[in-house]
Image: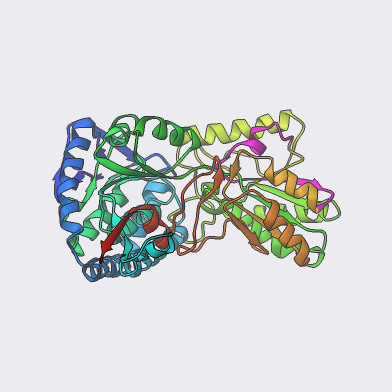
Amino acid sequence: MIKGYMLIGGKKVFKKEEIVIDFPFDGSPVGTVPRGKKEDVELAVETALKGFEKVKSMTAYERYQALQKAARIIASRSREFAELLTLEVGKTIKESMGEVGRAVNTITLSAEEAKRVLGEEVRFDAAPGIKGKVGFFRRVPLGVIGCITPFNFPLNLTCHKVAPALAAGNAVVIKPSENTSLTVIKLAEVLVEAGFPPEAVNVVTGYGEEAGDALVRDERVRMITFTGSVATGKIIMSRGGLKKYAMELGSNAGVYVDKDQTGRLKELAERIGRGGYALAGQVCISVQRVFVHESLFEEFTKELCSFSKSLKVGDPRLEETDVGPVIDRNAADRIMEWIEEARSMGAQVLCGGRRLSETLIEPTVVVNVPREAKLFRQEVFGPVIVVNPVDSLEAAIEAVNDSPYGLQAGIFTNDLKAAFKFAEEVECGGIMVNEIPTFRVDQMPYGGVKESGIGREGPKFAVEEMTEIKTICFDLN
């Protein structure tokens, strides 16, 4: 059992009330973290205000150096971080090692951005009658940023918020998911070890309605950056008041397989399957809805089921495991309910659909799913792929757009015009051509439209979100 703590100003804070973190695979306890409350958040924000004064006085090169050192420390402790990720999240050890590698890359990219927080000259004399005035604008840090992070990628997605914030000269208060707080505490300690002021990196553990709510409502917090559900995102924005927001919310990513893909269906089935079953489907850009030209539908679904059945489901600690558990029993209950609802509405479960334990669900393919079904309309966040036939590119575009979400989508086609039409007309923040919508590299602008969110992540773009413009004018007359 790991006894976790809150980290406020570099000090370990323990409390009598604790939250138990369980291993999703078998429910065994991994550790505990304190149940933080409003008073803990207030102390963390007060501390972060002092940390802001320190971190903004660091030179760009000093912030760059500290982030580079943090990346090196995490890289040197990769296995340690990965094993903790597997215990907290339930992702396979292969997936955990991949996340650690991405986190190192995200911090390294953020280090480079510390040297690129730039402004530019403003041509005041471009206005009529203005002479003798010169000036520029520069980007300056906001202050204290509240980072509310999810359970599924507690290391890399926290890095996507915290590293750009520090690169730009802000201080942070992190409220991690109560399911996966231990990894975030370890990350915060590394950032302090690497050279950031202890007051600038604070972690308050606890529940969203307690610690999270207090962080959102605190007027001294100048920005909230959040990854999670649409419902929670709306609550945050209704309670937070006048501050900046970056919201990375839900999705039910769609992909279209065009009629000219006849010769590569086995390959595409495997790629799409991996995109749907990675982390047991608990990825914001998991492939959830596949639209296949009707001429290829039967062969594609056959290949997808063949691939799905080949995957090893089980203990995520084992190297040979391909698909581990979902985060908890409640998530598994909901996923199974949605599968049964779709079945009752006329959909067919072609393969999978069985619950192997409280949290293990077989990779599942469901076809001919009505659009009213939750499996089509909402975010399943589980190892379930919906496949429906369509008769044209236009029908595929309409079906992909028939969603409250718009994070990423994909198309597989050899037709350049079809690719451009799809890219132009699909309402998403990212369009992947001849790639699954689950594709993401950490330097790209990442975010959605509609109910998928506000703002963009990716270190360069996050720095823009986490700074504001200050205009400076000199009168030389």
Residue at 26% x, 36% y is 219
Please state if 329 lies on the left or on the right of 436 as rendered: left
Task: Judge whether residue 440 can be spotted in this image.
Answer: yes
User: Residue at the spot x=47%, y=51% of the render?
Assistant: 315
Q: In this view, does 210 lie above or below 167?
A: above
Residue 424, x across and y down, in percent = 68, 56
- The answer to whether residue 58 is above or below residue 425 is below
Q: Where is residue 80 in the image (x, y as percent from the top left)?
A: 31, 60
As drawn, 238 above or below 24:
above
Q: Quadrant of the N terminus?
A: top left
Give the left or right position of residue 167, taking residue 50 as reference: right
Q: Which of 18 and 468 is in front in this view?
A: 468
Q: Is 198 on the left-hand or right-hand side of 241?
A: left
Residue 38, percent from left and from top: 23, 31
Image point 74% across, 29% down: which residue? Answer: 345
Res. 8 in view: no
* The magenta segment: 370-392
Which part of the image, by quadrant, shows the C terminus?
Answer: bottom left
- Identified at 78% across, 66% down, the residue is 415
For residue 433, what is the image quadrant? bottom right
